Structure formats: structure tokens, C-alpha cells
Amino acid sequence: MSSTPPPGALAAVLERLRLAETRHGRAPGSVGLVAVGKSHGPAALRALAAQGQRRFGENYLQEALPKLDALAGEGLEWHFIGALQSNKTAPVAARFDWVQTVDRLKIAERLSGQRPEALGPLQVLIEVNVSGEASKSGVAPGELAALAHAVAALPRLQLRGLMCLPAPAEGFDAQRRGFARLRELLEALRAEGLELDTLSMGTSGDLEAAVAEGATLVRVGTALFGERKPR
Ligand SMILES: *Cc1c(COP(=O)(O)O)cnc(C)c1O
């Protein structure tokens, strides 16, 4: 695991975000940054936290828990962004602030039931499969509305919006397509009366296209921490 992120990486990503906000008519500061720490150890995350980074995303529960322990008390916001198995929901409900990858009701019901009373509601996003590949996780767009209304009714969850990780696309216009789809799906749910304010989309390679389509959170790993070792 690398111990320190490349110098200047956080400032460079924040500058990319600010430029994209300006270019695409977004309010300054309206796009938040989730630093994706998978494969990187607590020291790398601590280095970013020392530079003011507050939101961190993790994909793998076993890998994440020691980092949450090491950085407890630093006032960080933890987002679970990986595939979630139903036998691992309890520690996620207890330790994370957000879960971005809800894609079926059974997982949402378990998270709601297991969210400790002492904590506020778990903030959740529904992951949508906007690219339509059989291998990708996320709910199919045609099943989204039913799932969203059911999740919004659960007592210990607060449904905030949608998340996607589209298939990699070459070029700005192609990248925009998947993100535009997610924005349209969010707008449709809002028209049905759900109060949603979050679109989590865009990574190191395509964050500008996501900002152009209304992202409120981007999830960036490689551009902050450098290349990952293969798992
Ligand atoms: C790894 C990962 C990211 C970050 O991707 P980079 O290309 O390293 O910026 C974002 N979202 C999810 C769900 C991921 O698994």
C-alpha cells in the first residue's frame, strides 16, 4: 500500500472541479469530492485529511474497518461505495455515514433495521445500472421508481439520490450520455414527489462530464492517490 499521495494531487483535483463548475454553469463549490481510498492504507488517507479532505469512500468492508478505526475522531465522513452482501450490512450500517450502492430492497431493509438508534439516519443512494451490461451492479432503470419509493419509506434510512459507475467511454460526449441518463432518472423521481438532492457520478477519468450533467458528488481515487495495485 502506498503511504503518501502524490504532492499537489488534491489541489489539482479540486482545481479540475472548480474549472468544470465554472465552464458548465454550476455554482462554485456545488460539487463535493469523495476520496476513494481502496488499496491505500490509513497513512495515505490521513495525509489527505490533513490537507482538509473530509469525505472518503471505501469499497471493501474488511479493508475499510482498520482505516475507520485508525482515523476515528478526525471528523471524517465515510461513504460505502462497494458491492454490498446481505451478510455484511450490520457493520456497514453501524460504521458508515453513507451507503451509495443500494440496489435491492432486501439490502435497504437490513441497513434500516441495523442502523443504531444512537446515530442519525443512514444516508443512502440507489446505484443505477445506466449502461445496461449484465455484469454491472445497480438496479435497472425500469425498476428504479418502485425501489426508490420503498427505500424512501424505511425509517432509519434517508434516501438522498442516485449513483452510477457507467462503462468506460471515450470522449466527453460519450461520457456525458450515462450521466445524463442518471440526471433524468433523478428528475423523474423528484417529479413523483421524492425529495432528492444528490447525484454521485464521475471518477478520475470523467469527472468533468459528470459535473456538466449535474453531479453533486464525484468519486475520485487514482487522480488523488496514484495507481492502485491490482487486487
Ligand atoms: C474505484 C472507484 C472509484 C474511483 O475510480 P478512479 O478511476 O480511481 O478515480 C469511483 N467509484 C467507485 C464505485 C469505485 O469503485
Image: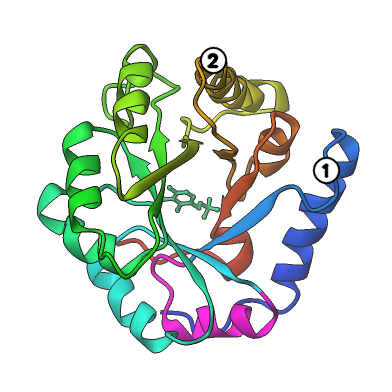
* Residue for point 35% across, 11% down: 142
Q: Is residue 85 left or right of residue 92?
A: left
Q: Which mark is residue 12?
A: none
Q: Which residue is mark 2?
A: 188
Q: Disc 1 on helix, strand or loop? A: helix
Residue lying at 29% horizontally and 27% vertically, measured from the top left:
150
Of tags 2 and 1, the one toward the viewer is 2
- Specify the segment rendered in magenta: 37-52
Above or below, 208 relative to 186: below
Residue occupying the point 19% across, 55% down:
89
Pick the front one: 86 or 105: 105
Q: Is residue 163 left or right of residue 28?
A: left
Residue extending furthest left? 87
* Residue 73 or residue 128, whichever sits in front: 73
- Could you say where residue 123 lies in the image, as x and y percent from the top left? 43, 51
| Mark 2: secondary structure | helix
Q: Is residue 139 magenta?
A: no
Find residue 175 and report its image quarter.
top right
Question: Horizontally, is 94 left or right of 163 in the view?
Answer: left
Picture quadrant of residue 178: top right
Would you say the beta carbon of the disc 2 residue lies within 8 angstroms of ligand 1? no
Amino acid at dot 1 = Glu
Q: Position of residue 147 (x, y in %)?
A: 30, 25
Pick whichever of labels 2 and 1 is earlier in the sequence.
1
Q: Which mark is residue 21?
A: 1
* Residue situated in front as seen by the camera: 51 or 167: 51
Label total for image: 2
Give how far across and how far down residue 130 sits, in percent: 45, 22
